[in-house]
Amino acid sequence: MKKILNEPAAYVDEMLEGLCLAHPEYYKQIGPEGRVIARAAGPVQGKVAIVSGGGSGHMPVFTGYVGKGLIDACAIGDVFSSPGVNQVTEAIRAAHAGAGVLLLFGNYGGDKMNFDMAGEMAEMEDIRTASVRVADDVASAPLAERGKRRGVAGLVYAYKLAGAKADQMAPLDEVAALAQKAADACRSVGVALTSCTVPAAGRPTFEIGETEMEIGMGIHGEPGVRRGPLKPADAIAEEMLALLLADMPLKSGDRVSVLVNSLGATPPEELYIVYRYVAGKLAGMGVRIVMPLVGRYATSMEMAGMSLTFCRLDEELEALLKAPCDCPFLRI
Amino acid sequence: MTTTFTTDTLRGALGRIIRKLDASADELNLLDAQLGDGDLGVSLVRGARAVEAELPNLPDDVGMALLKCAQAFTKLSGSTYGTLLATGLMSAAKATKGRTEVAWSEVSSLVGNATQAMAQRSGGELGDKTVLDALDAARAATEGLAEPSALAAAADRAVAECLDRFRSQPARQGRARIFADKSVGKDDPGMVALKRMTEALNQDH
C-alpha cells in the first residue's frame, strides 16, 4: 500500500499538528505530548464537558468532532491503539468547566481500562465523571451479549445527540442518560473490500482477495460474519439492511437517521448508490428517514468499504439531532 | 512505636521497592520471556523510575500521594501489569484521601480492597495463578497486624508460600494462559515481582 507520510513514528503527531494549523479556530493541541485536542475557544463555563478518544486512523473520529454542540476534548493514541491514562486525564482536566465530564467512547477493552482509570483519577481531583460506551456493531456479538459489541460509526450520533443535550446546560446525569439512550438507539454494520496498513507495521492489517468482500468486519480488521465474492451494491445493501433490521426491527411510522459511511477509500458516488437502495427499502416499509448523513464520518484510513448505521429517533432525539453544531466535519 | 504511617513513611518504602525492582529487572524479564512478552522487568523499572522522580514532590495527603504514584506509574504504557498495579494504588488512594496519617492496622484491608479493584478491572479471579493470588495471601496473613515490621514479615512469608503453592499449577489468565502447560512448574512473573517488593519492605530479609 502506498502512503503519503514522513517517518511512521511521526504519523500521528504530524497529523494532529496539521489538523490544528488548518482549523485554528476550532482545535488546539495540548498536554505534554500534544496528544489531546481541545476546543480552541476553551471550555464553556457551567456546561457538562464531553471527552472522547481512542486510537488514530479513524478521521474524523475522534478529534474531528471537537466543536460546538459536539464534544469538548479528545485523547488520541497511536494508530489503532488506545490513548494512555494520563492523556485521557489531561483531556478531562482541559475540558472540565465546573459541571462534570462525560466520558463517551467506543467499546474496546484497552479504551475501557484507560478511560475508567482516568475517570477515577479525575474523581480524586474532585472532577465528577460519568462514562458511556458506544457498542453499535451488530456483527461483533449477538444482541444477548450487547455489552461485548464494538463501537463504530454510531459514535457520531452519540456525539451529536449528547453534545446537543450538554449545550442545553443539562446536568451530568441527564447528559449521560441521553448519551446512553443515543448509544442504545444505534445499530451499525460494515463491509470491507480491502485492508489498510498501520504505518508503523508497514504491511496490510489483513489479507482479502481482489474479488472478495467481508460483511461485518470491524474497523481494525476484526473478523466479520461472512466472507464471500463481491456482490452488486443493492445485494450488499440488502444483506446489511437485513442484519440491522433483525437486530432492531423497524415498522411503519418509525423515524430513523441513516448514516452511510465510507471506511476511507470508497467514494461518495458508491455511498449514494447504497443510500438510494436503503432509502427505497425504508420508504417501502413506511419508515421515515430524518437528516441522513452520507460521506466519510468514521474511517479506517485507506480501507475500501462502507458501514451502514441506523439511529432510531423519538421526539427528543430528533430535536437534538437537528440542533446546531459546528466542527469542520459536521455543521448543522 | 508509632501506630500510623505518613507520606514520609511511604516515600521511604517506595524508595526501597524501587531499588529492589531495579536490581531485579533482568530476572523478571527472563521469567516473563518464558511465558509472556519478556518486558515485565523493563516496564516495571520504567514505572518505578517515574515514581522515583515524583518522590520529593509527594503531598502530605497520603491519598493524593498515592494518586501521584499511580499517575506516574501509568506513564509506562503497554503493560497490563503496570495498569493493574496503578489500579491497586488508586484503590488505596481513594480510601486514604484527605488523611495525613493512616493506621498500620488498615494495611490489610487496603490490600484487600486493592486486590478486588484489580480483579474487577482485569476480569481475573483468585486461583488464576496471578499477582491477585499473592496479594490475597498477603491480605490474609496481615489481618489483625498493626506493627510495620510484623506486617512486612507476614506479607513476605505469605507471598513466598503462595509462589510455592501455585508453582505446580497451570496459569489461567493473561498471556501465560496460552502457554498453560508450559506454565506448570514455573513461577508467575507478576507474583515474583510482588515477592521482590515485599522482600524490599521486609527488613529482616
Image: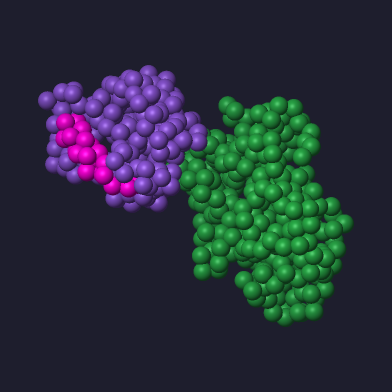
* Chain A image colour: green
Taking B204 as reference, is A129 left or right? right
Q: What stretch is highlighted in magenta?
A: B151-171
Q: In this view, does A235 lie above or below A10?
A: below
Q: Can residue B47 be seen in this view?
A: no
Q: Which colour scheme is used?
A: by chain
Left or right? Give the position of A191 relative to B143.
right
Label the magenta part by its dominant secondary structure.
Answer: helix
Residue ranking furthest to the left: B1
Give me the residue at 66% from left, 63% from top: A226
Location of the C terminus of chain A (image quadrant)? bottom right
Residue sitting at x 16%, y 31%: B153
B146, A207: nearer the viewer: A207
Q: Position of residue B197 (x, y in %)?
A: 29, 29
Q: Nearer the viewer, residue B186 or A35?
A: B186
Q: In this view, does A180 lie above or below A111?
A: below
Q: Is residue B93 left or right of residue A224?
A: left
Residue at (38, 24) in percent of width and height: B25
Chain seen in purple: B
Check if residue A160 falls in the magenta segment.
Answer: no
Residue B128: % across, % down: 33, 49
Which of the 4 image quadrants contains residue A77?
A: top right
